[in-house]
Amino acid sequence: MNPQKATATFRSPDLADYPELAGYTREQIYDQTIGGGALYLAARMVRTMRLNKGDIVLDLGCGKGTTSIFLARHFGVKVIAVDLWHPAALLSDKFAARGLRQDIVPLHMDITRELPFAENYFDAIFSMNSFSFYGGTVEFLRHLLKHLKPGGQLCVGGEVLSDEFTAEQLENPPYVYAFKLPPPNENVDVFVDDFSKQHTPQWWHDFFAGSGLLEVTDCHELEDATILYEDLVLYNIEHNLDPDDVEISIAQLEYGLDQRPCKSLFTITARKL
């Protein structure tokens, strides 16, 4: 595959559509973000939230902490940054280097296990590009939401599908969603661990609303989702990052031109009842 040829028609988002990122460089928007959308997605998520200075926000699945920094810096909130895969010491050093040591508390923990927070503690919960991995059951929602204040907001953003997988596709997944990772992760089942857990925005809306725990206040697919995916590929090529991901991302975008399901991005925000 010739990435330059394959991406000749790829586009980049219009920064004028993202005033939350005014003053950010392209590198800062993508700096150590994980998954699709980068800080463009984070900006779209916070538009649907009511964040007040001093609020306590759980950044659930914070990755390398870029979203936690975004939340603390732009909204004056106190952030509890929780992640399973990145050590708290690494995150703490990063937050201190950004002058945010007093504003963000990093914790290394499995969010699916018993949590050390008081009930009704958080004003809001923010989760970007991680919730689909663990959050798709009512049992988990009950487990998580007991730590959110009544009336507090849960905002989730991330990758979704245009359509649910058919029974046949679940049995024989399309290759673009069942590819092999390069070593040392060649034994990871990408479809089982990731794509089989993804759904449509409507599925997430119905799941949240049907839980009896939440009132959905906003749920929408990003109209520029494909552009954001294209731009991520362009950024990775420009910076010589993750050629394996570049190749599969191009294949997924090409697949979505005339086949379903295709990848997209969405946000959903709900109020705790």
Image (cartoon, rainbow, N blue to C red):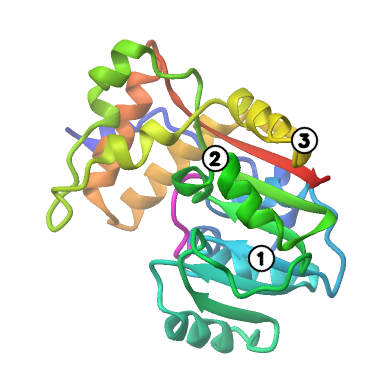
- CA–CA distance in space, label 3 to label 2: 20 Å
Circle 1 SS class: strand
Comes first in the chain, label 1 or label 2: 1
Q: Which mark is residue 151?
A: none
Q: Nearer the viewer, mark 1 or mark 2?
A: 2
Q: Where are the magenta residues, as a range? A: 31-36
Magenta segment main secondary structure: loop
How many other residues sit within 10 Å of disc 2, few (<14), some (14-19) or many (≥20)? few
Describe the element under mark 2 as helix, strand or loop.
Answer: loop
Give the crowd class for mark 3: few <14, some 14-19, many >=20 residues within 10 Å. some
Q: Nearer the viewer, residue 187 or 91?
A: 187
Residue at 57% in and 82% down: 95
Is 266 inside the magenta-drawn segment?
no
The circle drawn on residue 58 is 1
The residue labelled by disc 2 is: 137
Q: Residue at x 66, y 65 (%)?
A: 58
Residue 241, visible in the rendered structure: yes
Quarter assignment of residue 190: top left
Residue marked by disc 3: 218
Q: Indicate which label's residue lies in the foreground, 3 or 1.
A: 1
Viewed as shown, does residue 180 lie left or right of 257?
Answer: left
Among numbered discs 3 and 1, the one appearing first in the sequence: 1
Q: Nearer the viewer, residue 37 or 153?
A: 153
Residue 24 visible in the picture:
no
Residue drawn at point x = 69 percent, y = 45 percent = 44
Label 3, secondary structure: give it.
strand
Q: CA distance from mark 1 to mark 2?
A: 19 Å
Measured from the top left, where is residue 19 in percent x and y? 75, 52
Mark closest to the chain's N terminus, 3 or 2: 2
Q: Nearer the viewer, mark 3 or mark 2?
A: 2
